[in-house]
Structures are given as C-alpha cells and as structure tokens.
Image: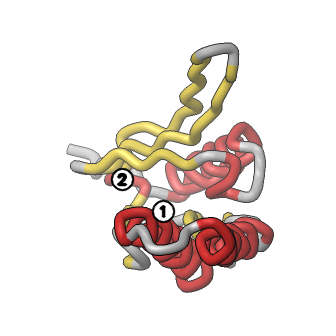
Amino acid sequence: MTPEPWRIKPVLPVTKLLGAVAIVVLAFAFIRRDPVQWAIALTASAGLAVWALRDLVAPVRLAADADGVTVVVGFAGRRRHGWSDIERVRLDRRDRLGVSSEFLEIDAEDALYLFSVHDLGADPRDVLQVLEELRAQYEKDEPGPAPA
C-alpha cells in the first residue's frame, strides 16, 4: 500500500512570502531613518520568509501507511514511527475566546505531535479516520503471541 500523505496547502507559503515582501515595502514607504524600526521590520520579514521556506522544503507534514506514520520534525527533518510505537491518535478540540480549533494529536514514544487543518490540508477528523483504518489493518495483519 502506498503512503497516504497530508501536506500544507500551496497558498500558505505564497501568503507568507507576500507578507514578507509587504513588510519590506511598507518599511520603505513609512520608515525613514529609525534603525530600531528597520530592525523590527527586517526581522519580521525574515521570519516570515524562513517560515515560508520551511513550507516549501517540507510540505508533507504527515504520511501514513499500513506500517506506521512519518512526521516532520524540526525545520524539515522526518521521523518514522511504527504503529507499535504509537500510544494514541485522537482529535484534540479547544474552544478559546469564541474560536474553536481542532488538532490531530499523535502520541508516539517520547513525542507528541499536533497537526492543524493548515498542516494537513484536510479536516483532522477525516485524517483521524484514515489513520484509525490503517492502524486497524496493521493490528489485523500483525501476528498474535506465540502459543505457550
């Protein structure tokens, strides 16, 4: 079975790059000689550009197959977890200040991974359903303990 990848939507890095350019353009338009304001503007612009670069370098945030999942760690590293290493996969829902957020939560070994709809490019509930099906397939195919 081929891995099922979930990736960010292409509009996100484009938007971040446009934001970085907009900050520089606005800085040229409104900041004259204040080095502190220039430093803040350039730092914000560089931060957005690096964030967009990460999205371009590692667009697939989560991939899963019958053997386990691969997640992005750090800037663009990858880490593989077999289904036997994963303790729990669930939907985490938070309501804060009138805004509801849903995250896919994967608890594997010594790490906890949270993926939003923006990370996955799909509804976390749909991804959870696919992951549960893949895990059930793994558990069905995995041989039981040897008879004593």
Q: Which mark is residue 118?
A: none
Identified by mark 2, the residue type is Ser
> Can residue 5 be spotted in the picture?
no
Q: Secondary structure at mark 1?
A: strand
* Left or right: 110, with 33 as reference point: left
Number of numbered discs on residues: 2
Q: Quadrant of residue 95?
A: top right
Are the residues at dot 1 and dot 2 in contact (C-beta closer than 8 Å)? yes
Amino acid at dot 1:
Gly
Location of the N terminus by quadrant is: bottom right
Q: Nearer the viewer, residue 70 or 132?
A: 70
Q: Look at mark 1 in the image and give the residue it sits on.
A: 68
Q: Classify 101 as above or below 35.
A: above
Percent position of residue 20, x then y: 62, 73
Q: Residue at x 49, y 63 (%)?
A: 69
Q: Position of residue 22 (x, y in %)?
A: 70, 71
Question: Image quadrant of residue 21?
Answer: bottom right
Distance from the alpha carbon under mark 1 to that under mark 2: 8 Å
- Label 2, on which residue? 84
Sooner in the amino-acid sequence: mark 1 or mark 2:
1
103 sits left or right of 88 in the view: right
